[in-house]
Image (tube, rainbow, N blue to C red):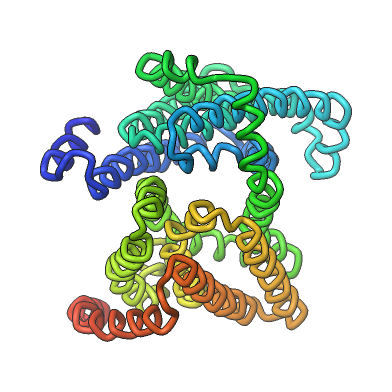
Amino acid sequence: MIDKLREALASKLPPGSFIRNVVTLITGTTFAQALMILVAPILTRLYSPGDFGVYALYASILGIIAVVACWRYELAIVLPEKDEDAANLLVLSICICFGMAVFTLILVALFHNSVANLFGAPKLAPWLWFLPLSLLATGLFMAFNYWSTRRKQFRRLAVRQITQSTVTAATQLGIGYVMRTGPGGLIGGSILGQLTATGRLAWQIWQDEGKPIWNSIGWNKLKRQLSRYRKFPLYSSWSGMLSTASNMLPALLLGYFFAPAVVGYYALGHRVLAMPMGVVGGSIAQAFFPRATEAKRKGNLDKITFEMFQQLLAIGLVPILLITIVAPDLFALVFGSRWWIAGEYVRWLSLWMFFNFISSPLSNMYLVLERQRAGLIVNAVMFSTRLLALIIGGIKGDALFTIALFGLTGAILWIFNCTYILYMAGVPALQVYDTILREAIRSVPYALLPLVAWFVFKNS
């Protein structure tokens, strides 16, 4: 069914076009997200909150170490002009990934009990033995993902997403219903989904391009790529880890300073904003990466980057304006009156999330232009500012003030990041701000009619 939908949409678009690639990725991601949402009510009846807690800790640890699974060399696969160089980067990433899995196994053997006790979850300890396998599946996928992105084989990636979500959901449901193994069912389903989907992607690549890749490999070529793209492990690894840590900060510090309910309000509000933006923004980012790399070689990077910026503004501005105005009442209507405050949080988070959505595809410019050091500095500033905003708000003892300060400082930083990225690509800052102002004025009439309809419905 999802293939028919994708083909129906794609048939209206030129083969190999940017929009067609985005549509292909969005359909796969949307199906994967929708399936996990649909099975969530069943999973919550098969597994306890404690099981989900152990699973969340496992996933968080994996998320942090997965950033350096291939030492970030996988990001460089899209960049070389020659496929031969990219193939050696792919093999280099795979070799590093296997080495990191072995290193992780040694760490688990030495410290699995200590790590579990550190997080106050002794039940996590036996499941940490599966961490090297999860890291291997995740790292290999990242390498194959960027190779497929380079080759513009986006259908492979859409199929991979669908495969992973289907196998994960089916396994978690089956184990939870039949075996009742606690968090093992959730963790086991996740691992099996990763392995199956990554294995399928690897097989597709081997069938289609295995021989050219194999013939391109050479020891001296591997060493040359290891040195040529050394900025990726030196800067991008730290940058990625800071970005991952930044995403964990709000929940951790809100939980430290305030009641768990505040974390729940933030989590729901952030999830409602992040899910659609993540589906669209992530798909655009993946399709834009090889396009930007080609544009750099052709000398028109400023033009296609500015066009992308304009398109992202046009896509997101009206929805974010509507959400900002009606969020509290909308959350109370959809989720129940007790979730009204989550909508109030969304008001303050929306501008930050909007410019995050715009910057996500454009952030590939740090890689395309090989300005990883600048990217690391930007991520360090963002991490420090977010940390400071949450601490100031927490000390003040006002949850809404904390969210507002966090959201507004985040918005300012992301606007700066967006401006700096466009400046690196050759677009003047004044042109950026003029475009934002013009698009904001243009979006007002489109937002008025839905707002009038909403207030009529609310007061009827």
Rendering quarter of residue 139: top right
Above or below: residue 362 compared with residue 150: below
Visible residue check, residue 375: yes
Rendering quarter of residue 408: bottom right
Above or below: residue 244 compared with residue 329: above
Q: Residue at x 50, y 71 (%)?
A: 352
Above or below: residue 380 compared with residue 14: below
Residue 357 placement (x, y as % from top left) = 43, 62
Q: Residue furthest left?
A: 12
Residue 18 placement (x, y as % from top left) = 26, 48
Above or below: residue 369 compared with residue 262: above
| Number of residue marks | 0
Q: Quadrant of the N terminus?
A: top left
Q: Residue at x 40, y 37 (%)?
A: 150
Visible residue check, residue 50: no
Q: Residue at x 27, y 40 (%)?
A: 24
Q: Quadrant of the C terminus?
A: bottom left
Q: Residue at x 76, y 29 (%)?
A: 104
Is 120 on the left or on the right of 197, as rendered? right
Rendering quarter of residue 64: top right
Pick the residue in front: 36 or 353: 353
Residue 216 placement (x, y as % from top left) = 49, 20
Pick the residue in front: 310 or 409: 310
Residue 276 placement (x, y as % from top left) = 37, 55
